[in-house]
Image (spheres, coloured by chain):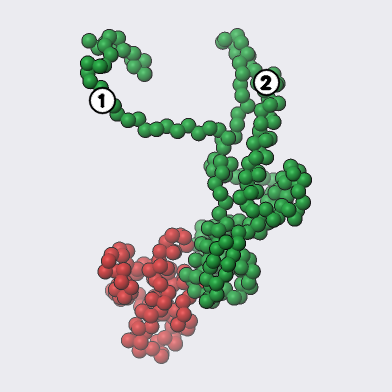
Amino acid sequence: MAELHLKGKTYTIARLKLRKWLDFEKSQEAITKTVEDKNAEEYARHLYILISTVLNIPIEGLLDAPWYETSEAYVVITNLNRVKEIPLLKSDPSKPTKIPWEYDGRSWFWWVNLFAKNYGWTQTVVEDLDIDDAVSLLQEILVGEQLDKEWQWDISEIAYPYNTTTKKSEYKPLPRPAWMEERKVFLPATKVKFRKSSLPIGRIIGESGNERIVD
Amino acid sequence: MSALSIDKAIKLYHLLEFFLPVKVDKEMSVVLNYISEIVYNIRVTNNHKVYLEALALMQDTTIDVIIETYTPEQSLSEFSIGLQENQILALKEFCTRVGI
């Protein structure tokens, strides 16, 4: 829950449920586009649409609100409806490409199909989900699907390709999506000083393969 | 005079954009010093039309009405009140941050 102030009134707002959140996301995309186009009028229009939808008040009531109250309201609404960061949402930096079967409003049906297929939920149940729950469940569904695929892969011949050099079949695991990969953390190397008398002597082969003799 | 709506406020920012002081030091953070610097920047660059357009926008009227009915002192006073009312420092920060 959050509070925002507009034209002398205080509104208490709750996080949007999945269906309304998808509309909110669409408005956010439109707002980003207007900023890219440097179109102040369209920017304002989309802000008003978004705020009026969330507050459930007519747009006409917002048109004369001071600019700083409108922008503050937008910030409050955006912060309240932020999605929690989970590996699935953090990992893939590639831009989504437009697919041939895409159409306006498809994302809603994509979510309904996902949960109906996996959990047998109805449209009403799906539209009432919190977005954090929805994305967490999506990640669980994708993990389940990947582990099933890995199982199928592991028991098939394709997982054990023949290596002509070693003349043996070697296990090759099914690649995982980037967000399921374990992240390697490299700590910065720290310089440690040793007394000269403690250093090794004789023939030393370095990391890069170079050799030197130390007396 | 009341604060402008968001689209008009952005328009105001774009009108004054090149006359807003770049550095906001301690002295400049006092809003009246900041506003007088804006007026000075407009005056030295001979951009009186920008001044009149900004004032007309804030007064929700036309340049002709401003010229006919306001004395120079009155217009300066209204200009200053208008920029204070519209929180010009915050408006600059907002437009720069959003990138619009």
Look at 77% across and 51% down and name the residue there. Answer: A122
Q: Is residue A36 left or right of A27 when viewed as pictured? A: left
- Give the residue pinned by disc 2: A158
Q: Disc 2 sits on a residue from what chain?
A: A
Instruction: Give residue B20's quadrant in the image.
Output: bottom left
Say what amino acid the circle numbered 2 marks: Ile
Report the side of A90 relative to A122 (left or right): left
Q: Any idea which chain is the green one in this picture? A: A
Query: Which chain is red in the rendering?
Result: B
Q: Quadrant of the C terminus of chain A?
A: top left
Q: Which residue is mark 1?
A: A193
Relative horizontal placement of residue A142, taking residue A7 as reference (left or right)? right
Q: Residue at x 63, y 52 (%)?
A: A131
Of residue A174 and residue A210, the one placed in the foreground of this image is A174
Q: Say if A148 sits above or below A14 in the image.
A: above
Q: Quadrant of the N terminus of chain A?
A: bottom right
Amino acid at the residue labelled 1: Lys
Looking at this view, is A117 or B41 the one in front? A117
The percent coordinates of residue A26 (x first, y second) are: 62, 57
Residue A38 position within the rendered picture, expressed as x and y whole percent measured from the top left:
50, 62
Q: Please, is residue B65 above or below residue A151 in the view?
A: below
